[in-house]
Amino acid sequence: MVNGCFDPLHVGHLYHLLAARRLGDMLIVSLTCDESVTKEKGSQRPVFNQVHRENMLRALRCVDGVMVCTDALDALQKVKPAIFVKGSDYLRKVDAGSRAFCAANGIEIMFTDELTFSSTKLLKHYAESGRR
């Protein structure tokens, strides 16, 4: 299982999802709901609402299922996956509650070391360059 905002979905997400899929028999994506994205990223986000983000993720062959959750811990409690995969940029950002839940339930936390891109940096770049 992976979780995140995936807003907007970009090549870094694709590499991360492909790498995560290679780690197991199937890949479930926990998609952060719109309200949580706004709380985490600010009033201008999400760029795409959760229905659009969910549909884009479902269209990827490497994704076996998508569920909308408030945060990683919510998803972990519902799915109880064998492996919880985050990008290497989250090495020190997995919250204590999720780490504790994984430890208590034998869920391995793994990190992909694929190319890292940032949606926030990408959007900032486009805003500053005046591109539409």
Image (cartoon, grey):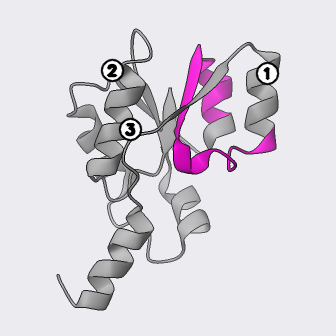
Question: What amino acid does circle 3 point to?
Answer: His
Q: Nearer the viewer, residue 24 or 70?
A: 24
Where is residue 82 shown, x and y percent of the image? 59, 13
Disc 1 secondary structure class: helix
Q: Which residue is mark 3?
A: 16
Q: Residues within 10 Å of mark 2 (few under 14, many from 20)?
A: some
Q: CA distance from mark 2 to mark 3?
A: 15 Å
* Disc 1 to disc 2: CB gap under 8 Å: no
Q: CA distance from mark 1 to mark 3?
A: 23 Å
Question: If you read the primary sequence from the N terminus, does the residue marked by circle 1 or circle 2 appear first?
Answer: 2
Q: Which residue is mark 1?
A: 103
The image quadrant that residue 78 belongs to is top right
Q: Which residue is mark 2?
A: 64
Question: If you read the primary sequence from the N terminus, does the residue marked by circle 1 or circle 3 appear first?
Answer: 3
Please identify the residue farthest to the top as the structure is shown. 25
Question: What amino acid does circle 2 point to?
Answer: Asp
Disc 2 secondary structure class: loop
Where is residue 19 shown, x and y percent of the image? 37, 29
Provide the residue span drawn in magenta. 74-96
